[in-house]
Amino acid sequence: MGSGGLRAGNRFTPRVDIFKNDRERTLYAEVPGARAEDVDLHYENGELTLHGKVQPRRTGREGLLLQEYDEGDFYRAFNIHEPIDSGKISGECKNGVLVVHLPKVEAVRPRQIQVKGG
């Protein structure tokens, strides 16, 4: 899709779940119908943005009885308040779910320190 921004027309906000553990934050976004090549992820200065396009599944509205899946452009932005290793961020789009892995910088990960006796 590129970084050209959002187009006029239908826009929607995908629903998102975010989980965390000691190693990373993982974001799951509902984007049914989106293909990997239609998704643009960007991380800069602690802000993660995702936007893209869900192509119409059919042309025209003939025969449409019910439509609950959104079509058109989508956009979300998140401020991440801990150091993220931006070189290791990864994303995948599969079965209508965008999964983004945001690994923490190793220096800020909690770790157990062994205490030795003398």
Image (cartoon, rainbow, N blue to C red):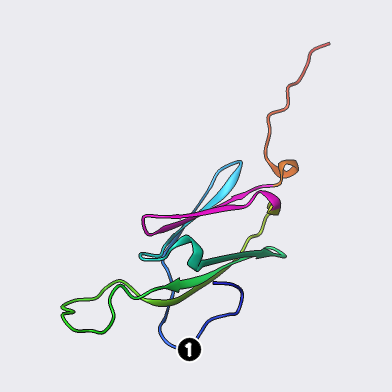
* In magenta segment, residue 96: yes
57 shown above or below 100: below
Question: Magenta residues, as a range?
Answer: 87-104
- Looking at the image, which residue sits at the far bottom? 8
Q: What is the quadrant of the C terminus in the image?
A: top right
Q: Where is residue 42 in the image (x, y as percent from the top left)?
A: 63, 65
* In magenta segment, residue 71: no
Disc 1: which residue: 8
Amino acid type for the residue under numbered disc 1: Ala
80 shown above or below 65: above
20 shown above or below 51: above
Horizontally, residue 63 falls left or right of residue 31, namely: left
Horizontally, residue 29 falls left or right of residue 115, namely: left
Say which quarter of the image contains residue 29: bottom left
Comparing 13 with 81, the one in front is: 13
Q: What is the quadrant of the N terminus in the image?
A: bottom right
Q: Main SS of the magenta segment?
A: strand
Identified at 26% across, 84% down, the residue is 60
Q: Position of residue 90 (x, y in %)?
A: 58, 52
